[in-house]
Amino acid sequence: MENKQNILLISVFLLLAGLSAWLQFGLLESSDEEIAESEKNDPDYYVENFTSQGIDSLGRSYEIISDRLVHYPVGDRVLLDNPIIIQYESDGTARRVSAESGWLYNNRRTVLLTGNVRVIEGGSDNSVGGVASTKKMVIHLDQDRG
């Protein structure tokens, strides 16, 4: 009788040890993977009052201004809050595009602007040459704008 109790006690102990090991290595390991997967979509840095200047393939300059830039490592995406894109033409005119938000793609050469997009074309004497608005706009910063 005592032998049966010892076997039962050892069996229960082994069952509890196995269950503890499974909880330790099975469940915790998968939850770490889930956390790591969710962190992939988290931003890795942000910049307040962002300003950047560049030159397109034809030598014309442009400027990107934003209240905040947020970089996401997955897909190397960049979110812009209240962006303003100013593209300067060789004749001295400028195109100013503003929006509520925007995304930089394609190695920072393509901008997708969304939400109350407003385009102001500058005249040669710094007067307004034209105004347009839309909900969404794509700007390719490294292409001929002529």
Image (spheres, grey):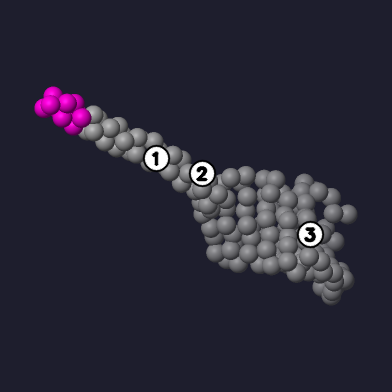
Which secondary structure is most common in the magenta stretch? helix
Relative to 93, 109 lies left or right? left
Residue type pointed to by label 2: Glu
* Of residues 135 and 32, the one drawn nearer to the viewer in this rendering: 32
For mark 1, what is the residue? 27
For mark 3, what is the residue? 137
Q: Nearer the viewer, mark 2 or mark 1?
A: 1
Which residues lie in the magenta part? 1-10
Q: CA distance from mark 2 to mark 3?
A: 31 Å
Residue type pointed to by label 1: Leu
Q: Are marks 1 and 3 in contact (CB under 8 Å)?
A: no
Could you tell me if residue 119 is visible in this image? no
Near mark 2 (Cα within 10 A), the count class, few <14, some 14-19 or many ≥20, is few
| Point 15% across, 30% down: residue | 5
- Mark 3 lies on a secondary structure that is strand
Could you tell me if residue 135 is visible in this image? yes
